[in-house]
Amino acid sequence: MPEEKKEPIRCRAILEVIGKPKEHVEKTIKMLVDKVKEDPEISILNEKYAEIQPLEKTMFSTFVELEMVFKGLPAVTGFCFDFMPSSIDIEKPEQLTLKNRDLSNFFNDLQSKLHSVDTVAKTLKAERDFLRRNMDTSISNLITVLIKINKNTTEELSKFTGINQEEMEKHLKKLIDEGKIKKEEDYYYLA
């Protein structure tokens, strides 16, 4: 069965980069465009780079406007998921004609990409939660060791650990609630 010709779609899209240092932002925006150029389903007709602007105290931002032709709607969808443009404007054709099979394929491709994104998000959340639990355990152990060596105040524990006093108070309260330490006047000691 011969492959159906995909209807070309002409778009303008804006890709943004925010980060630091300035040189990294400049390098990253160009690498992003180079990555788009690697896709055989996309032809870049024109690229306009904006000047890099300072953002807040140490961050920088820039963007590039790309004029492109895609080989069909699935290529546009893939581009949107892979490069997360801040905006995309379809210029041509004025109307798209889709067969129900093509629309089904489009939605199946969309669902596949959504499932991939969901898997990555769930994996990252699980890793973050694991790291957070381990960090909290390590901090609790460090506090316990410091208190075992000597009674300490919140200020002293904060100084020894490098954890600000507000955050330290949360950890100390948790250890008190768990019955592992006690507070007498301003000093903490093992229960």
Image (spheres, rainbow, N blue to C red):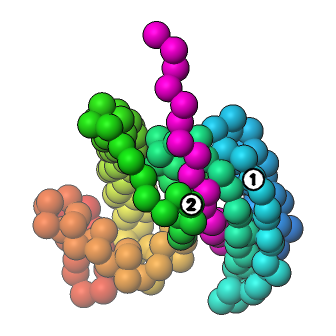
Q: Is residue 21 visible?
A: no
As rendered, which of 64 and 69 lies closer to the eye?
69
**For the residue marked with disc 1, what is the amino acid?**
Ile
Residue of label 1: 44
Check disc 2: other Cα within 10 Å, few if <14, some if 14-19, many if 20+: few
- Magenta includes 15? yes
Identify the residue shown where x is 47% and y is 41%.
74
Total numbered labels:
2
Looking at the rendered image, the quarter that the C terminus falls into is: bottom left
Alpha-carbon neighbours of circle 1 within 10 Å: few (<14), some, or many (≥20)? Answer: some
- Type of secondary structure dominating the magenta stretch: strand
The three-letter amino acid code for the residue at tag 2 is: Lys
Camera-nearest residue between 97 and 58: 97
Q: Which residue is mark 2?
A: 92
Q: Which residues are magenta?
A: 1-20
Q: Look at 79% across and 62% down and name the residue there.
A: 46
Left or right of 4 in this view: 114: left
Q: Residue at x 42, y 52 (%)?
A: 96
Under tag 2, what secondary structure? strand
Structural distance between the alpha carbons of marks 2 and 1 = 15 Å
Q: Quadrant of residue 174?
A: bottom left
Left/right placement of residue 164 relative to residue 153 reads right
Magenta stretch encompasses residue 175: no
Q: Earlier in the sequence, mark 2 or mark 1?
A: 1
Q: Where residue 138 sits: x, y (%)?
A: 40, 51
